[in-house]
Image (cartoon, rainbow, N blue to C red):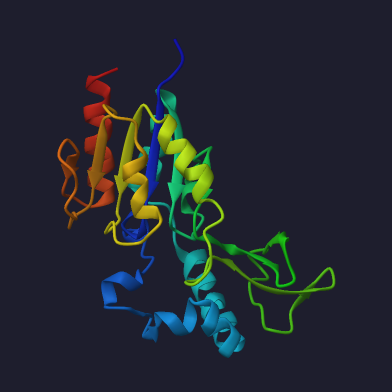
Amino acid sequence: MGKKKLVISTGAGMSAESGISTFRDAGGLWENFNVMDVASADGFRRNPQLIHKFYNDRRRDLLKAKPNAGHLGLVDLERDYDVYIITQNVDNLHEAAGSSNVLHLHGELMKVRAIDDDTKVWELHPEAIETTPETEIEGHRVRPHIVFFQEAVPNIEPAVELVGQADIFVVIGTSLNVYPAAGLLNCVRPGTPVYYIDPHPAAVPAGVTVLPMPATQGVAELARRLRLHL
């Protein structure tokens, strides 16, 4: 018999212990900016210079960050499970830790894409992370490869499909307030075990196992519980 499919949805709390700041913790301010100025389609139209600078700064922060024990713990689970990660995070810490299957819902910080062609996406080299409204790659002006507020979430359909196939579903480090990602909890097949790890958990349906702790502790506890059922 093959490995069980373990599908894990991660949010900002997954990376918080690596020093990646979250705007949700600051009442709608992110690094002292109004979120709609630096993370919305309207904001990009109004002031592309500000948004390029903002994401240049976030990339610099990311280059200083390292995966935490929670990220590494999810990699360890691949020994016993077929693990798929769906993340709201735009950092690459799951990949840096060594996770094999990562689906980014809200884009990727270390990538840019053509303004005039969504299919053209480029990875930035760590030595060359700065972009401006004038930056061109292969003849195309670029923007952060980020799903801004007011834009569709292209990867939500493959995410829904993955969750529907899960033998076990886990949610880590999210307030369950950001849609459509929060709705993934409703896509689980009836009878599927569901775990929710967060130090300040939101209300969840009956039957969900809540582990009210930070990601690093929670992943260790999750691994302990899952081993009991192998």
Is residue 36 in view? yes
Whether residue 47 is visible here, answered yes or no, is no
Q: Quadrant of residue 66?
A: bottom left
Residue lying farthest to the top in this orientation: 1
Residue drawn at 40 percent across, 56 percent down: 180
The quadrant holding residue 107 is bottom right
Q: Residue at x 17, y 58 (%)?
A: 200
Q: State the image coordinates of residue 99 (x, y, percent, origin top left).
A: 49, 40
At a point 44% along the width and 62% down the height, the residue shown is 65
Residue 90 x/y as whole percent: 49, 61
**Quadrant for the N terminus in the image:** top left
Q: Residue at x 57, y 90 (%)?
A: 46
Picture mark count: 0
**In-front residue for pair 221/181:** 181
Looking at the image, residue 15 sits to the left or right of residue 220; the answer is right
Vertical arrangement, residue 203 with respect to residue 46, above or below: above
Residue 116: quarter of image: bottom right
228 shown above or below 127: above
Viewer-proximal residue, 154 or 211?
154
Q: Is 200 positioned to the left or the right of 193 in the image? A: left
Using the image as rendered, state which of residue 189 and residue 100 is in the foreground.
189
In the rendered image of this protein, does residue 58 appear above or below residue 202?
below
Compared with 185, 62 (above or below) is below
Rendering coords of residue 159 (x, y %): 48, 44
Q: Quadrant of the C terminus?
A: top left
